[in-house]
Amino acid sequence: MEDGIVDDDESSAICDVITEVVGDSYSDTGLSSLGATPTFRYAAFEDVASDLSECCFVLTGNFRIKPRRKIEEALKAKGAEISKTFMRKTTHLIVALEASRDWIETHQGLKIKKAREYYQDAGQPLILAEFDVTRALDLS
């Protein structure tokens, strides 16, 4: 770091020290520091059309916006369909920053696992981060 630039090795070392002090940083950074825990790439909500009539959203996790219904209503107002369960027609999965009590692993539940599998086969659903969606819907 003497050169004023943090390279990949230095970044990893910094993250290791932070993890030792405060725990895993996943909820803040989206990057897991817990061994082989899976991570995924979020899509930008801006890439989603303002008319969501062809979209089916599923939400997973413990959202900061309470109740979750507020997010669902804002999406429905733009024409989106909301589903409680993940299915082939799901186009978007919105992931909360905090795990649900039902998640099977530290950073994912069955909905996220299915979404990752379906994405490899069909290129959807897009995975969206809670903070990005709530900001774009002006709910934050």
Image (cartoon, rainbow, N blue to C red):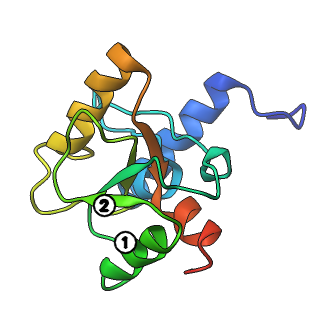
Under tag 1, what secondary structure? Answer: helix
Q: Which residue does the image show at 55% across and 31% down from the upper left?
A: 12
Residue 84's label in the rendered image is: none
Residue 72's label in the rendered image is: 1
Q: Relative to 65, is 86 above or below?
A: above
- Measured in 3D between alpha carbons, the distance from the residue under mark 1 to the one under mark 2, in whole angstroms, is 7 Å
Q: Is residue 64 visible?
A: no
Q: Which residue does the image show at 90% across and 31% down from the upper left?
A: 3
From the viewer's side, name the closer residue of 82 and 109.
82
Residue 82's label in the rendered image is: 2
User: Of the residues shown, which amino acid type is indicated by label 2?
Assistant: Ile
Along the horizontal axis of the image, is 29 left or right of 27? right
Q: Which residue does the image show at 34% across and 71% down from the upper left?
A: 63
- On-image quarter of the C terminus: bottom right
Q: Relative to 71, is 5 above or below?
A: above
Is mark 1 in CB contact (under 8 Å) with mark 2?
Answer: yes
Q: Earlier in the sequence, mark 1 or mark 2?
A: 1
List x then y, in percent, for residue 118: 29, 24
List x then y, in percent, for residue 14: 58, 41
List x then y, in percent, for residue 112: 26, 40
From the viewer's side, name the closer residue of 32 and 8.
32
Q: Which residue does the image show at 19% across and 62% down from the upper left?
A: 100
In the picture, residue 11 is in which quadrant?
Answer: top right
Q: Is residue 85 visible?
A: yes
Under tag 2, what secondary structure? Answer: strand
From the viewer's side, name the closer residue of 22 and 81.
81
